[in-house]
Image: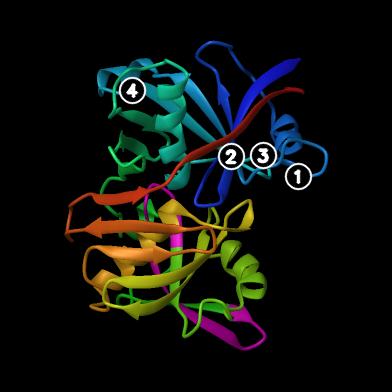
Amino acid sequence: MKLAFTKMHGAGNDFVVLDAVMQPLALGAEQIRRLADRRFGVGCDQVLVVERASAEGSRAGADFRYRIFNADGGEVEQCGNGARCFVKFVHAKGLTAKREIAVETLGGLIRPRLEDDGEVSVDMGAPVFEFARVPFAGELAGMMQRLDLGDGETVEVAVLSMGNPHAVQRVPDAEAAPVARQGPAIERHALFPRRVNAGFMQVLDAHAIALRVYERGTGETLACGTGACAAVVAGIRQGRLQTPVEVRTRGGRLTIAWAGGDNAVWMKGPAQSVFEGVVET
């Protein structure tokens, strides 16, 4: 089967975007893995599928359904950088004339909006701290949770969900952080039944952080939108940050704002198309 696609990225977090509104799709995990392969496929961190909203989503006001598949072929709940690309894609393809849309995801309804400066803002919804909903199997013991990584190594992380699970630790130097070594151990830690995204946050000042994220099912990416949201929320709750916060990733900069409590987290950043093509699957 020949499949039309668009290659996009948000701050270096790259995607293969597929239109399943105009061309019905039923891709298996192996096909997703081939598309994401950087040597034998198109290459990306995640494959994003644009669909019509489900009946339930339509009743909730959704304009589209947004499905996210990691490079390992597994479907996940949320992707913030992908959400920014999503609204640019549907607008460019003439699937909507709206500058702000409601999008149904496995992690809940989100609202990306095209801004006049060419960037995209996204209402990412309120953060979730209830362990059963993250999910996290640890016991409540303050704001930080201790993880045993084996061989006598432990780390303290803030545990929360931004539609997908995150474990955020504070490090003195993001560039020197042991992402490649600790990332896989945290991702697959037994206390996270659905695995977790591991964030390594360096606080630069009250309104700026440097961040690296080892993403579940993908590995380290140049940027992670939900990871940026999770890190800022964790920092604000700990009294180390004040909204808004500039998040400096290896792929670019994002701006995150959160007023605390049950308020939604807002993310603003770039989204760009790179090229279009057709691939055989």
N-term-proximal mark, 2 vs 3: 2
Nearer to the camera, 61 or 10: 10
Mark 1–mark 4 CB contact (< 8 Å): no
- In the rendered image, residue 270, in percent from the top left (x then y), is placed at 42, 46
Mark 1–mark 3 CB contact (< 8 Å): no
User: Where does label 4 land, which residue?
Assistant: 57
Which labelled disc corresponds to residue 80?
none
Whole-angstrom CA distance, mark 1 to mark 4, is 33 Å
* Residue occupying image coordinates x 30% and y 57%: 256
**Identity, as a three-letter code, of the amino acid under mark 2:** Phe
User: Where does label 2 land, which residue?
Assistant: 15
Residues shaded magenta: 149-166
Whole-angstrom CA distance, mark 2 to mark 3, is 13 Å
Report the side of 85 relative to 111 (left or right): right
N-term-proximal mark, 4 vs 2: 2
Which SS class for mark 2?
A: strand
Is 163 colored magenta in this rendering? yes
